[in-house]
Image (cartoon, rainbow, N blue to C red):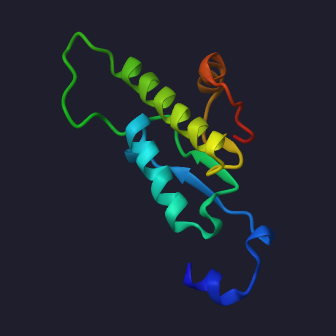
Amino acid sequence: MEGFRLSGVPRKELFISTKVPTNAMGFQSTSALVQRLSQELPGGYADLCMVHWPQADPPLVELPKSKSQAAWAVVERAGTWRALEAAYDSGICKALGVSNFLVKHLEELESYARVDPATN
């Protein structure tokens, strides 16, 4: 951020994008990340907030054998997207997107997204 401040370039002339890493997937983790971004980024917002990868890091606790890792990943993706939609609603993210999503991930996202992704 120091370089930005010293550059003298107005914030409105920059396009800042950021990605939610796999270790910050899920509603709570993504919400915390977005709040931190709002405090650290020039102007308090990002022009584009993306989900970096469709797979979340494995849960910190082992899932019972009767539970599906794939189902857990869907819940984490949906929670991440909900947190990004909240950031979009509050103006912290001006646009939302995904990265490295396959067609099956995009179709899943389409089934629950209120805000469509602007990029993949």
Q: Is residue 92 above or below residue 26?
A: below
Q: In this rendering, does residue 26 appear at all?
A: no
Residue placed furthest toward the bottom: 6
At x 63%, y 58%, the residue is 45
At x 62%, y 49%, the residue is 49
Residue 36, given in percent of the width and then of the height, sits at 45, 58
Which one is nearer the viewer's eye here, 23 or 91? 91
Q: Is residue 68 left or right of residue 103?
A: left
| Residue 8: quadrant of the picture | bottom right
At x 63%, y 84%, the residue is 5
| Residue 29: quadrant of the picture | top left
Residue 79, given in percent of the width and then of the height, sits at 47, 30
Query: Quarter of the image containing the C terminus?
Result: top right
Q: Is residue 31 left or right of residue 107?
A: left
Residue 19, given in percent of the width and then of the height, sits at 55, 51
Q: Is residue 28 above or below residue 77?
A: below
Q: Is residue 113 left or right of residue 63?
A: right
At x 43%, y 35%, the residue is 27
Q: Is residue 33 above or below residue 63?
A: below
Query: Quarter of the image containing the N terminus?
Result: bottom right
Residue 11, given in percent of the width and then of the height, sits at 73, 72
Which one is nearer the viewer's eye here, 91 or 37? 91
Task: Say how many tags the image has.
Answer: 0
Q: In this rendering, does residue 43 appear at all?
A: yes
Which one is nearer the viewer's eye here, 39 or 116? 39
Residue placed furthest toward the right: 13
Which one is nearer the viewer's eye here, 69 or 110? 110
